[in-house]
Image (cartoon, rainbow, N blue to C red):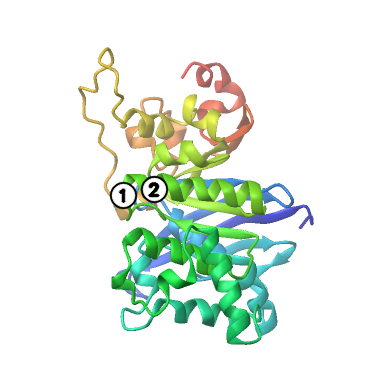
Amino acid sequence: MPENKLVEVKDLSKVFIIGGRFFGSKLVAVNKANLSMDAGKPEIFTLAGESGSGKTTLARMILGIIEPTSGHIYYKGKDITKLKNKKQKSWFKREVQPIFQNPFEAFNPLKRVETYLFETAMNFGIAKNKSEAAQVVDEALRAVGLSLSEVYQRYPHELSGGQVQRTCIARALITKPSLLIADEPVSMVDASLRMSILNFFHKLKTDYGVSIIYITHDLATAYYVSDRIAIMYRGYIVELGPIEKVLTNPLHPYTQLLLESIPKPDPDRRWNKRIKLADIEVKEYMALGCKFANRCQYAMDKCYKEEPFDVEVDERKVKCFLYSDEKASVGSKI
């Protein structure tokens, strides 16, 4: 893998067996995903899609929490699916830190909050003793608008949801990572804190050079904070490109449907119809051809039989037959 890539995901797939090991069905949660982020060029890259699209499974594979069924994940030139010894794994965990959806699940309710912060600093060799750890922890907390004195000797339930989430982010910052993977990090906090956390992500990118993979189903927050976005549907990345292009001029029919499902505050364009997104059904994952074909107004015969391939259109990749050479004129009109 080229050294100029921070992360590169190549043909990454994850298959789960539903209903038993010998007689169950195969569910392809992530199907041949490809994406990359450049080293030395910090960005906020969003994975978006409805529940069950595969975005969290993809993120957990990048984190090393879930083992891929096939494909490769490279981080700074190293294939992380092949990291064997403790030193290599510790290096990766220090470089890539997670931020999960529910901050309260990250802490034992019977354990004081600062204990986790001190343990992180000591276990990764950031600090040699408790005194050094206190300085490191306080610096990380101040970066998110808190201080050690505010959380010291306090249990998770004694902090607000926003404080606990910011403490989680501070804990991730202690190791000075190059990449944060944030899974729905603002869904559990109120609107005002939501914006402050998103603004902080932007600050991490611009001031600290940290890249972020942001997982969300909320296209409004994605548009506000992201540089690029990948739209996922039934395990596939169906459209990937600059945030402005994807969300202001979507090419894939599924991306168009996602945007149409968002009510617009315009009295002249009232949202008077119901857009029904698919329920999570195993049969849709197992269907031949394009997973979206049954609900796509542009579907052709081959869409039901053949798996679409990635086509490069206007600085992005779109997994759709509408944009193959023979259908380029049709694709440009939608």
Compute the Cα span from label 2 to label 1: 6 Å
In the image: residue 29, left or right of residue 230: left
Camera-side residue: 93 or 15? 93
Seen at 50% across and 51% down, the residue is 214
Whole-percent x and y of residue 161? 32, 61
Whole-percent x and y of residue 99? 47, 62
- For label 2, the SS is helix
**Callout 2–callout 1 Cβ contact below 8 Å:** yes
Using the rendered view, name the quadrant where residue 168 is placed: bottom left
Quadrant of the rendering where the N terminus is positioned: bottom right
Using the rendered view, name the quadrant where residue 54 is placed: bottom left
Using the rendered view, name the quadrant where residue 188 is placed: bottom left
Give the numbered dot on residue 190.
1
Q: Which amino acid does label 2 sit on?
A: Arg
- Residue 307 shows in the view: no
Seen at 75% across and 62% down, the residue is 77
- Residue 225 shows in the view: yes
Whole-percent x and y of residue 16? 41, 66
Seen at 60% across and 83% down, the residue is 131
Is disc 1 surrounded by few (<14), some (14 to 19) or many (20+) residues within 10 Å?
few
Provide the residue designation for mark 2.
194
Name the residue furthest bottom.
129
In the image: residue 52, left or right of residue 241: left
Camera-side residue: 33 or 328? 33
